[in-house]
Image (spheres, rainbow, N blue to C red):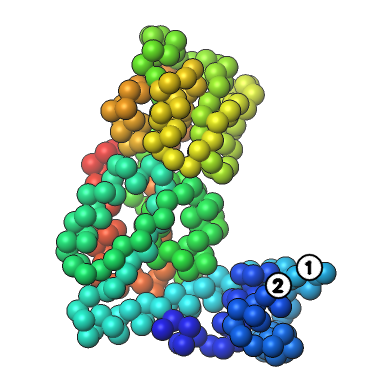
Amino acid sequence: MSTSLLNRRLLHFLTVYETGNIKRAADLINISQPALSMSLRQLEEELGSELFQRQARGVVPTEAGEVLYRYASSIRQSARLAGEEIVALASGRLSRLRLGAGVAWTTTVLPDVLINLQRQFEGMSIDMVTGVGDQLAALFLAGNIDVLLAAGSMPRLDAPDIEKEFIANLPMLAVAGREHRLARRKLVHPDDLVCNVWAGFYEDEGFFHLAQHYMALRGMPAPKIAVRTNSAAALTAIVGSSEMIAILIAPLAHSASKAGLCALPLSEPLWEMPVNIYYRRVASELGVIRTFCDAVSERIKKLV
């Protein structure tokens, strides 16, 4: 449905952007390579800007191309949601909701929210993608996620067509196994943390930069992250059975206590993380998205 509602040139542009190769894009949308190149040239002429830099192995978007991609992705999602709403008028329900969430939420806040959401919107399927900030932001910008729940700053999502709802600032906590030497201390100082080996989440560069900044302000080197994983359960198990420590947002740290970890008694607090929900403005009137946002916000605010 969404493809049929899209402008042909925008569809061509999106396919080239996401494949990075005109020949591959032409094969995907089943047109000739010269026809696709002509379509791109016409779009560039219409906009008065070059959208791609041609290179030997493909194409790279220009600054104008990046801007157009953000809005074209929004248009594509609008087309998909339009199709969904039209179907919903006949069936009385939205057929699918695509959610993205940071690893901290999938085992804490979201299970009950999603169960209640599915009961309230019976017949609707829910796709939930878990990851870290940069991964989820890319999927959201590409139109593969309708709603994103994430902690931390995401400047890539500061755009006129994207709505951001702030929920709360939540503290980060240091955790370790109950038998860890730091767990037996009355107070754990920043230099105790940086001298220890850490475990963290895979590709969570935003977290590493915050940790590095926190230590640099205290005249200490960046922490050493020895193990990275994209699984909260795996991270908990690794920390619980080793001498490693982890820095987790409060809800995940509290959940990890059930698996044998404990929050370390810090001499001074770590940094806080803003928790936000992101969605396209075009989707703001969808009842299921409003219901999801309200339910998540209510649950997270109870944790503050």
Seen as rendered, the residue at the extreme right is: 56
Quarter of the image for residue 226 reads top right
Q: Earlier in the sequence, mark 2 or mark 1?
A: 2
Residue at 22% across / 75% down in the picture?
93
Residue 272 coordinates in the image, percent (x, y): 43, 36
Residues at badges 2 and 1 in contact (C-beta under 8 Å)? yes
In screen coordinates, is 258 left or right of 180? Answer: left
| Numbered label attached to residue 57 | 1
Q: Amino acid at mark 2?
A: Asn
Whether residue 154 appears in this view of the structure is no
Q: Quadrant of the N terminus?
A: bottom left
Q: Amino acid at mark 1?
A: Arg
Q: Where is 158 relative to 35, above or below?
A: above
Residue at 56% across / 88% down in the picture?
8
Residue 39 coordinates in the image, percent (x, y): 67, 88
Q: Where is 273 relative to 284, above or below?
A: above
Residue at 36% across / 82% down in the picture?
83
Which residue in the structure is indicated by mark 2?
Answer: 21
In screen coordinates, is 74 left or right of 93? Answer: right
